[in-house]
Amino acid sequence: MNLVERFKAGLARSKEGFLRRLDLIFRGGELDDEFYDDLEETLILGDVGVEASLKLVEQLRLESRRRKARERGQAREILIEQIAELLAGVEEPVKPVGEPLVILLIGVNGSGKTTTAAKLAHRYRSEGREVLLVAGDTFRAAAIEQLQIWAERANVPLIKQQPGSDPSAVFFDAINAARARQIDVVIGDTAGRLHTRTNLMEELKKINRVIGRVQPGAPHRVLLVIDATTGHNGIVQAARFNEAVPVTGLVLTKLDGTARGGIVVGMQDILKVPVSYVGVGEKIEDLLPFDSLDFANALLS
């Protein structure tokens, strides 16, 4: 299946019938007040969020009038354009000359950071780049073992230390090793931490500082991994993490199993942080670059 088909397959599992309701709203009929009211309600129920839903519907109303659109099918195409524009991401940073590109994955427990790190390593490896994984979750021995298994699947080396080690020290060693080996990309896993735990968030800040001291300008990407099925709790998590360490992109895992899918729109509207990747399955190749137009089409086509 291509990207659109994977999105649709996951979103179609919605018990609330989010896609079905959207489809019914856009079938035939005029662009009257009932249409806009129904659309607004459905977007809110689909986890798009109240503010984003109100904004999208009002923009749709104005743009439909400007284009003199009279049919709901025309309004659907306009809304696809609006959502795609809202979700448009940013280009990947250029790899520093003579230095590795350093990527740090952060997030709460169970969001899928460890598997995302390996899947991301697989993507870069398949592009012909030399990749190094870092087992920065030193609190759980199982996390180190899990990443070791995934590193072998991705055919990339792993830097690790004993459970209980200082995670900052692991990253210090890893980046120095990457520079010595002329590695292209360093991808670091970190321990899951609740956004409400001040001491753990301070430790994350320390990791960020240490990486920057070893290699000025790093980490070049800080990807916040969020379980898409958490709905708007994910937005609260994202906001707190973004306060501790500036987040450059989001990775939404389990998008193939989310109940609604509108959370992608809601997060972007509130956080102004682009979605970089989406997880749509459990296989190592099931991490896909996010495409805003593909997603908008999957949501509304």
Image (cartoon, rainbow, N blue to C red):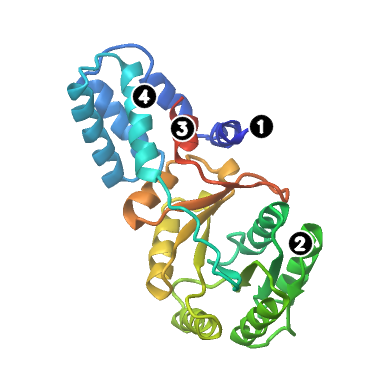
Residue assigned mark 4? 77
Residue assigned mark 1? 1
- What residue lies at 50% left-to-right and 35% top-to-bottom? 294
Residue assigned mark 3? 299
How many angstroms separate mark 4 from mark 2 (CA)? Answer: 41 Å
Q: Which of 219 and 4 is in front in this view?
A: 219
How many angstroms separate mark 2 from mark 3 (CA)? Answer: 32 Å
How many angstroms separate mark 3 from mark 4 (CA)? Answer: 11 Å
Return the disc, 1 or 2, that comes first in the chain's sequence: 1
The amino acid at mark 4 is Glu
Q: How crowded is mark 1: few (under 14 residues within 10 Å), some or many (20 or more)?
A: few
- Quarter occupied by residue 273: bottom left
Return the disc, 2 or 3, that comes first in the chain's sequence: 2
The vertical placement of 82 against 252, above or below, is above
Element type where label 4 sits in the image: helix
Residue 9 showing in the rendered view: yes
**Image marks 4 and 2: residues in contact by CB distance under 8 Å:** no
How many angstroms separate mark 4 from mark 1 (CA)? Answer: 23 Å
Residue assigned mark 2? 150
- What residue lies at 29% left-to-right and 33% top-to-bottom? 40
How many angstroms separate mark 3 from mark 1 (CA)? Answer: 16 Å
What is the quadrant of the N terminus in the image?
Answer: top right
The amino acid at mark 3 is Leu
The amino acid at mark 2 is Trp
